[in-house]
Amino acid sequence: MGRVITSDEEYRPRPSRRGSRPRTKQRPDYADAVRGVIVSVDRGRYRVIAGTDLASASAKAPVVTCVRAAHLRRRAIVPGDRVSMVGDTSGDHGTLARIVAVDERTTVLRRSSDDTDPTERVVVANADTLVAVTATADPEPSWGFLDRTIVAAFDAGIRPLLAVTKTDLTPADLIRERFADVDVEIVECGFDEDGLPRTDALLPHLTDRQSVLLGHSGVGKSTLINRLVPGAGRATGSVNENTGSGRHTSSSTWALPLPQGGWVVDTPGVRSFGLAHIDPDAVVSAYEELTPATADCPRGCTHAEDAVGCALDAWVGSGAAGPAGARRLRSLRRLLGNLA
């Protein structure tokens, strides 16, 4: 047992472990921080390439491995984010720098795991083009996925584009008809004589831009990336003959430099693309061929099939929505039903 204190004179307070120096409210200004852009994220390690944005960053610039500062631990940092870093930014093997600031984003592409999950997942930051990759067959087009990615692109202020693969198996006529009245570019990427996807029609839409590619597994997205960026080495896979679905091959998100200028962000194959974070009005506005009819709908109209006074059915019936109007209306109502 310790000694028993019998008087106040014998009492000696313990020294404070925190010390006597008051904490300063001044924070470092990081005036010497190096600017860069996130090109990949993997288990708490961020790969950053020097440059103010991906369009100006050099593909030959050193890639710096970073961790994020403690004050950013609650901040999601994704490929495309413009950051400031301090520490060893040489990019040499075994070196580590620290991300101390993240710039405000110009665009944010988000998704949720499903339409009832309120948790947002940021896919990429500061992209200006979204390329939804789909095959005409093997596997069949996922109309729901294509509709959702286009809606997400419009909501984020990103230009949508459809890259259609495997047109040697089935023509892209049905895809073109379905999206004929939507403000989305459709580019065919059929196979050449060597069995590789053609990229000559797609490249002009990607050069000097920051693009993100999305697609279900098995549609040929990784094969397309490997053709666009020689030496990328993105894993490719085949389609399951029993289920008609592709297996996941790319397991991480990477920003890759195009030889002609610009960058493409390759994402893992996605199984679902939830829109829980998107307001229903934003979904309606993405269907530009249907939007004019909503001016004649009653206030608070849900635009559901049984909604009293909804003007969409008469609009589609008159042919004003184009030849694909009925299918587009069904697609819109399906999305709105999932968000309800």
Image: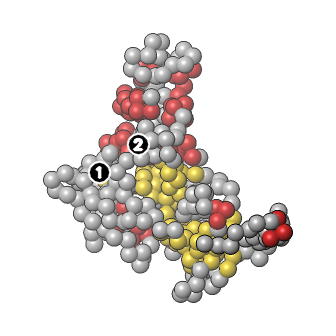
Q: Residue furthest front?
A: 6
Instruction: Locate residue 292 relative to residue 179 in the image: left or right.
Output: right
Whether residue 7 is visible here, answered yes or no, is: yes
Choose between 319 and 228: the one closer to the eye: 228
Instruction: Locate residue 88 relative to residue 119 in the image: left or right.
Output: right
Q: Amino acid at mark 1?
A: Thr
Q: Which mark is residue 136?
A: 1
Asked if disc 2 and disc 1 are in contact, CB closer than 8 Å, the reply is no
Quadrant the N terminus occupies: bottom right
Residue 213, given in percent of the width and then of the height, sits at: 45, 58
Q: Judge whether 301 appears above or below 243 on screen.
A: above
Instruction: Say which residue appears at 65% left-offset and 55% top-offset.
Output: 105
Quadrant the C terminus occupies: top left
Q: Residues within 10 Å of mark 2 (few under 14, many from 20)?
A: some
Instruction: Say which residue appears at 64% left-offset and 81% top-offset.
Output: 89
Residue 277, given in percent of the width and then of the height, sits at: 52, 40
Residue 106, given in percent of the width and then of the height, sits at: 65, 53
- In the picture of the structure, the residue carrying the numbered disc 2 is 114
Residue 166, given in percent of the width and then of the height, sits at: 29, 57
Nearer the camera: disc 2 or disc 1: 2
Instruction: Say which residue appears at 31% left-offset and 61% top-offset.
Output: 248
N-term mark: 2 or 1: 2
The answer to which image quadrant residue 335 occupies is top left
Task: Estimate the spatial distance between the alpha carbons at disc 2 and disc 1, rounded to whole Å.
Answer: 25 Å
Choose between 38 and 313: the one closer to the eye: 38
Q: Residues within 10 Å of mark 1 (few under 14, many from 20)?
A: many
Q: Judge whether 41 appears above or below 169 on screen.
A: below
Q: Residue furthest left?
A: 242
Choose between 109 and 86: the one closer to the eye: 86
Q: Which mark is residue 266?
A: none
